[in-house]
Structure formats: C-alpha cells, structure tokens
Amino acid sequence: MDPTMTKLSETQIIILSAGAQRPDNIALPLPKGLHGVAAKMAVGRMIAHGWLLEVNANLRQGEPLWRETGDGHGTTLVVTDACLLAIGIELVVVKTVAAIRNPTAETPEAKQPTRRAGTKQAMLIALLQAPEGATMEAIIAATGWQAHSARGAMSGALGKKLGLVVTSAKEHGRGRVYRIIREIA
C-alpha cells in the first residue's frame, strides 16, 4: 500500500524518516517513549502496510535487535524501498548517503560467501553434486539434520547465498532425488 494514500501518524513519520537516513534503512532504534505493546502495535501496522520489513539481524555487525526468534537469532526492521519511493525519497540518494557515512563498508553484492571444507554444508554439496544425486533419507543420514532443515539449507544457504541451482525430481524406485545442476552466473 502506498503511504501517500494513507495518512501517516507522527510516530510513523518519525520512524520512516529516521530509518531512511540510516545505513541499510534500518528503522531501529524506535523513538524514545515508544516501547512494549504500543511499539508492537505501531510496527505491526507498518509491516501490514508494507512500509517496514522484518529481516534477520546481523548481530555480528551490530544491527539493532527488534525481537529474538528463539533459536539464538533475532530480527531487525528495515524501511522498504517501496515506502521510501512513495514518501519521496530517492533510493540512489539514500544509498549514496549511506556510502558516504561508511565508505569502508562493502556492498552486499560485493560479498562472496566462502565454502568451508569439512562442514555439513560441504557434505550436502558433495551429495548433491554426485551424478546419482541424493534422496532426503540419504541427506538426513549423512548430516543428522531433520528434513525441514535440509530443505532450508538447500534453498537458503545453497540456493540464495552460494548461487547453486538445486533441482528435485521423482525417480522410479528412489522417490524424490535432489541434485545440483549448475551455479548461477
């Protein structure tokens, strides 16, 4: 939803404009005095409108924490690009200002994830690169992961982070078989 079509409250304007001025458009910290249930309600409305997005926080880089997810990780809040455009902020200007403030920071596109030998991820890649591929049962037996964790690793770590294309197909007598067919260029 376009923020210009809905009247923004003073609190929403403060959160969005402050987030637009921060590196990576992080909307935290919230204004002083906004906490607890009021903060959850305000943020919830802004997420519902598509103005804020809850993303995984990079705690190693000191990104502020919105909430803990219970698995040792947390999330932060980011002002969406669509919201910035709708409230009249040019994305190029925002990214240029962020680069000027922190010229030594690498852009996310410049970071290339590294593959480490001897890890469960490396084991998974080896299984999937084999000509016969791997069934979910073989992946579970080799890694000790549950099926949902293995599927998440194939989609997230291998697909999104490492750029590998993982396919799956049902094969007679074996069931669903997963394979890495190529790397995304």
Image (cartoon, rainbow, N blue to C red):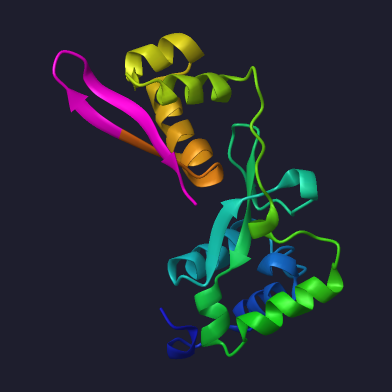
Q: Is residue 152 above or below residue 8?
A: above
Q: Does any portion of residue 144 appear in the rendered image? A: no
Residue occupying image coordinates x 69% and y 84%: 93
* Front-most of residues 66 and 135: 135
Q: Position of residue 45 (x, y in %)?
A: 48, 68
- The count of marks equals 0
When asked about the image quadrant of residue 68, the answer is top right
Q: Is residue 158 left or right of residue 148?
A: right
Q: Position of residue 71 (x, y in %)?
A: 59, 31
Q: Would you say residue 9 sits in the magenta stretch?
A: no
Taken as a whole, is the magenta stretch helix, strand or loop?
strand
Q: Is residue 53 left or right of residue 92?
A: left
Residue occupying image coordinates x 66% and y 53%: 66
Q: Position of residue 184 (x, y in %)?
A: 47, 48
* Front-most of residues 3 and 166: 166
* Front-most of residues 60 and 49: 60
Residue span colored magenta: 168-185
Q: Is residue 21 above or below residue 77?
A: below
The residue lying furthest to the left in this view is 172
Q: Position of residue 78 (x, y in %)?
A: 61, 64
When asked about the image quadrant of residue 154, the answer is top left
Q: Quadrant of the N terminus?
A: bottom left
